[in-house]
Image: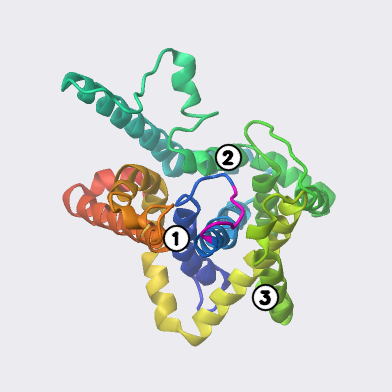
């Protein structure tokens, strides 16, 4: 569904937030997944952890929230005709690009390994597929283009949307209190690849979408409180990496920080409409950056940046190297998008799910 409607609407705010949020996703993958405690070069560790493992953590939950909102917006999921129509749309916009990107990366890794051997070299990290089970895992349990776990989970949630619709309607939305509590206390589950985070934020968006509910009028009077709570919870996160309460504090930040992001989008739309318009125009790049950025991050940008000893993670220029890594990844992604749009626009459209 299009996210452009009347100026100042919730949909326009969603539209302008998508590009900044994908930049945060790139930042998440600019450092190792493991949390690091600031010591040694404290400034580099603190700043990179604050951005990648702190501030940026609102991005994926908000994307689930937006997807849930538009999955349920003006749609009666109790009707089988709606199931078939929506599942068909998701097959084109999500499933097809999901399969293509994972297949493409598998072929690249296989080609790289065999080419190195053919040229008489020894692959540093040889990629070999030994059986069909291993191959299948790259499309589900161990997604080879690992950020695409979001698409995998979104496909599962869309398939389960009739059940989600039933739960929301029978409970009149109160089921969200249960899921929200489980999320905040750090309850862990994995059912059909789904954890509590995607389920909660998807259904939270779905509940609002069912009612065509714009959350911003409710959030606006709380804007200062939400902003302060966001700062109080996110700023100490890098120092709490070993704390048993890290997950709970992060969860609270994601809720308050996500709400604050919506309010900042509203303020930008109102007070800086030209910037807001530019961000809305950049929405077309979001899916491509999302799908391709880890390939470029791992294989190109990191190789270029870390060739310079001064910019490596254990060197004085580590912080500069960190931001260069993000900037180069973004630059490469945008360049490749422009190249494909010029040379093979139909292929690009398929890779981006028709976006």
**Left or right of residue 313, residue 36 in this image:** right
Image coloring type:
rainbow
Q: Is residue 233 magenta?
A: no
| Classed neighbour count for the residue bearing mark 3: other residues with Cα under 10 Å, few (<14), some (14–19), many (≥20) | some
Residue 179 in picture, x, y percent from top left: 78, 48
- The residue closer to the viewer here, 48 or 148, is 48
Write down the residue under mark 2: 153
| Classed neighbour count for the residue bearing mark 2: other residues with Cα under 10 Å, few (<14), some (14–19), many (≥20) | some
**Left or right of residue 234, residue 347 in this image:** left
- The residue closer to the viewer here, 216 or 20, is 20
Residue situated furthest top in the rendering: 131
Q: Main secondary structure of the magenta part?
A: loop
| Classed neighbour count for the residue bearing mark 1: other residues with Cα under 10 Å, few (<14), some (14–19), many (≥20) | some
Residue 239: quarter of image: bottom right
Write down the residue under mark 1: 23
Q: CA distance from mark 2 to mark 3?
A: 30 Å
User: Residue visible at 69% across and 43% down?
Assistant: 78
Can residue 277 be seen? yes
Residue 245 in picture, x, y percent from top left: 77, 52
User: Residue visible at 31% across and 57% down?
Assistant: 328
Report the mark closest to the observer, 1 or 2.
Answer: 1
Q: At numbered mark 1, what does the secondary structure look like: helix, strand or loop?
A: helix
- The residue closer to the viewer here, 106 or 165, is 106
Mark 1 / mark 2, whichever is N-terminal: 1
Q: Which residues are magenta?
A: 35-41
Mark 1 / mark 3, whichever is N-terminal: 1
Kindly identify which numbered label has been placed on residue 227. 3
Report the mark closest to the observer, 2 or 3.
Answer: 3
């Amino acid at each position: 569904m299009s996210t452009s409607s009347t100026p100042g609407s919730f949909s326009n705010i969603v539209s302008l937030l998508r590009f900044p949020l994908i930049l945060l996703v790139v930042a998440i993958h600019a450092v190792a997944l493991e949390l690091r405690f600031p010591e040694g070069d404290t400034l580099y560790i603190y700043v990179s952890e604050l951005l990648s493992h702190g501030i940026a953590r609102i991005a994926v939950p908000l994307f689930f929230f937006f997807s849930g909102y538009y999955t349920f917006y003006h749609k009666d999921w109790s009707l089988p005709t709606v199931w078939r129509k929506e599942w068909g749309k998701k097959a084109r916009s999500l499933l097809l690009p999901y399969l293509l990107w994972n297949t493409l990366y598998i072929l690249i890794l296989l080609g790289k390994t065999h080419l190195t051997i053919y040229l008489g070299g020894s692959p540093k990290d040889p990629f070999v597929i030994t059986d069909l089970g291993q191959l299948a895992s790259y499309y589900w349990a161990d997604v080879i283009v690992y950020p695409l776990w979001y698409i995998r989970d979104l496909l599962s949630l869309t398939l389960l949307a009739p059940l989600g619709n039933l739960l929301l309607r029978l409970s009149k939305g109160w089921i969200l209190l249960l899921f929200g509590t489980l999320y905040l206390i750090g309850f862990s589950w994995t059912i059909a690849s789904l954890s509590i985070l995607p389920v909660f934020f998807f259904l939270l968006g779905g509940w609002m979408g069912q009612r065509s509910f714009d959350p911003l009028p409710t959030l606006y009077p709380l804007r200062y409180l939400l902003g302060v709570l966001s700062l109080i919870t996110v700023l100490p996160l890098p120092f709490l990496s070993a704390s048993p309460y890290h997950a709970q504090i992060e969860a609270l930040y994601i809720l308050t920080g996500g709400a604050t992001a919506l309010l900042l989008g509203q303020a930008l739309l109102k007070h800086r409409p030209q910037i807001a318009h530019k961000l809305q125009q950049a929405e077309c790049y979001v899916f491509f950056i999302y799908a391709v950025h880890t390939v470029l991050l791992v294989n190109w940008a990191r190789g270029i940046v870390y060739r310079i000893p001064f910019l490596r993670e254990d060197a004085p220029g580590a912080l500069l190297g960190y931001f260069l890594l993000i900037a180069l990844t973004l630059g490469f992604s945008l360049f490749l998008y422009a190249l494909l749009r010029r040379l093979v626009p139909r292929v690009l459209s398929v890779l981006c799910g028709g976006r």
